[in-house]
Image (cartoon, helix red, strand yellow):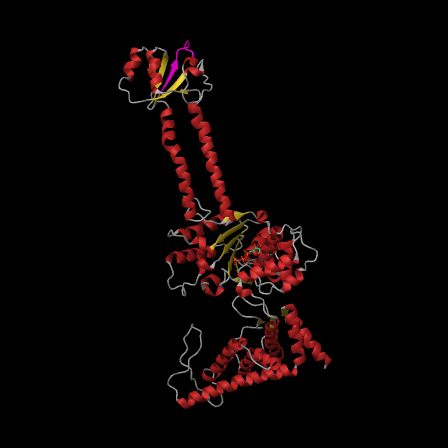
Amino acid sequence: MNKGQKFSVWYFLIALIVAWLFAEYIYKPYTEGKTEVPYSEFLADLDSNNVENADITESRIIYTLKENVSPDKRPIVGGVILTNKKAKNPENIKSVVRLSDPFLIERLSSADIKFGGIARKDGLIDLLMGILLPMLPLMIIWYFIFRNMHGAGGGIFSFGRSRAKELQGEMSGVHFSDIGGAGEAEVELREIIDFLKEPKRFDKFGAKLPRGVLLVGPPGTGKTLLAKACAGEAGVPFFFITGSSFVEMFVGVGAARVRDLFEQAKKKAPCIIFVDEIDAIGQSRMRNFNSNSEQEATLNQLLAEMDGFEDNNGVVIMGATNRPEILDQALLRPGRFDRQIQVVLPTEEGREEILKIHTKKLPLDPAINLKSIAKVTPGFSGADLANIANEASLLAARRKAEKVSMNDFDLAIERVVAGLQRKTPLTPEVRKKVAYHETGHALVSCYLPGSDPVHKVSIIPTTKGALGYTLNMPNEDKYLVTEAELRTRMAVMLGGRAAELLVFNEASTGASNDLERATETARRMVTEFGMSQKLGPVRYASPSMMYLSGNSEVRNDIGEGTAEVIDTEIKRLVSEAQEQATGILREHEKVLHEVAGTLQEKEVINHEEIQAIVDREKNAE
Ligand code: ATP
């Protein structure tokens, strides 16, 4: 946005310079060297026989006084007297606005004055001055109004031009050292940077690199910053555009913009095109019921351009969104945005790094402990932390202090938290519950053979409202799932609730989603997959709707008795899963406490850390 404003200031300066050049080189020479006099004075000069000769143009009469007439005899009215090389005495040349005087020629003839010349370029200059000069301010005002109507960045005649603001890689000036806590995303982006640095090397091996990289994550986590850092590290030009600016009030503009953007980018390859808020154009055509054809045309053009890339032509297109689920599937196909990089909310360590970056230039009180600030700000994004650092420095400046104190930071956090209700830090009790809940999921998964290995466990609240999460990574794509595997999955789902019951003797609302998923699995086992002995190999679910995944419905033509058996069977399966989970956690209660403790301390733990604790207990036995 700032860049747009800077842009308009430049235009304003250019308009001023043009106006000055006009005045200096066109208007001034025209008036220079001639004394502007009123018509009455011209008539007086004629009557006194003081006029040597006269040139008549469409709008003026330029006349020269006879040499012997002293200019001092008459007052000079208006105009500037400067040099005129042709005249012996420049002060003797007068200019007068030509009035509609029917006797003019007669007057000149009778005074025996040499006169003539009408085809002077003064006519054109007069026209310019008479019409264009008064219009100039109007034109400038009109231009700025127009620009504001269409946002910054585009010229009046450039609706179809892309708004991608090009920054040279060096100019983007951002490097990975300016980004905190982006470890994983950074590793994934390294390959792209290598490719941008040396596309030829990849060509030699016939390797094809992803053309599109989608950065997915909550707002303010530094997606734009990461894309900029890629350009900065690779030293290539960076084109930045937001999805919404493609779609304008003028029909057909979006598609033209996309075309223009890619044309520009190809000329500058290797380079990066970054489309922020890509969901503004890439929204699924299926779900967008009131889809406007303008958005669709823009999306189609984007897809066509991405398909039209030759392999490894050196243009990498990066998109950012915080709503990947609404994107059109066509955008995510191979050859388009086929690589997704998750940019998650920072961990405690990451938050400390980000705070370090943003306080680098601040005069900090030595008592400030960034680690403790990072500890109390779970769920805060990089942008929130940058905001906190800024608020703290403002508070210090306001109290005219030499250094930013810890108290400034405390107040700044309060301020930012007040502005972001959803980010109220969790109370220690809630944190503890969440930690045990997530550990429950993770440990059941660890101890049950055949379950998906745990990748990461976190108690950083997500923007979708979850207070924590356990990420399981399947080892392989499963096309066929056995009954035992389904039971294992259910046990893992219920592990969180089992842990809460075991440790706190009561369940909490945090498990409602787990219960829903476990119940749905049990329902399908019973009604779709024939996995209940009592009900036998009969399908009780209504015919499935292909492509529309969702909860299966029980057929409405089944008897009351059967419906009851279905319910009891579902209940049995869910209860068994819960008992299994409880049994495992009871057996390994020590590990449960240890992992939950570590999780409360570190907020995020990964597979290796959990495995280390599990192994330690095993060896101790
Ligand atoms: P949005 O989804 O709203 O477009 P974004 O994910 O693109 O947000 P950025 O615009 O990159 O976020 O980040 C906004 C600001 O927050 C940055 O200019 C920077 O000051 C700060 N910031 C965000 N993440 C980080 C980080 N990991 N390290 C340092 N600063 C960060």
Q: Is 283 placed left or right of 177 in the picture? A: left
Q: Is residue 586 above or below residue 240?
A: below
Residue lying at 27% horizontally and 14% vertically, measured from the top left? 106
Q: Horizontally, is 202 left or right of 21 in the view?
A: right
- Residue shown at the point (57%, 52%) measured from the top left: 231
Residue 333 on image: x %, y % = 48, 63
Q: Is residue 261 magenta?
A: no
Q: Give the magenta part as a residue range.
A: 61-70
- Residue 576 location, quadrant: bottom right
Q: Quadrant of ligand 1?
A: bottom right
Residue 434 % position (x, y): 59, 73
**With respect to residue 516, does 341 lie above or below?**
above
User: Which quadrant of the figure contains the C terminus?
Assistant: bottom right
Q: Nearer the viewer, residue 446 or 501?
A: 501
| Residue 516 position (above or below residue 234) | below
Residue 216 visible, this angle: no
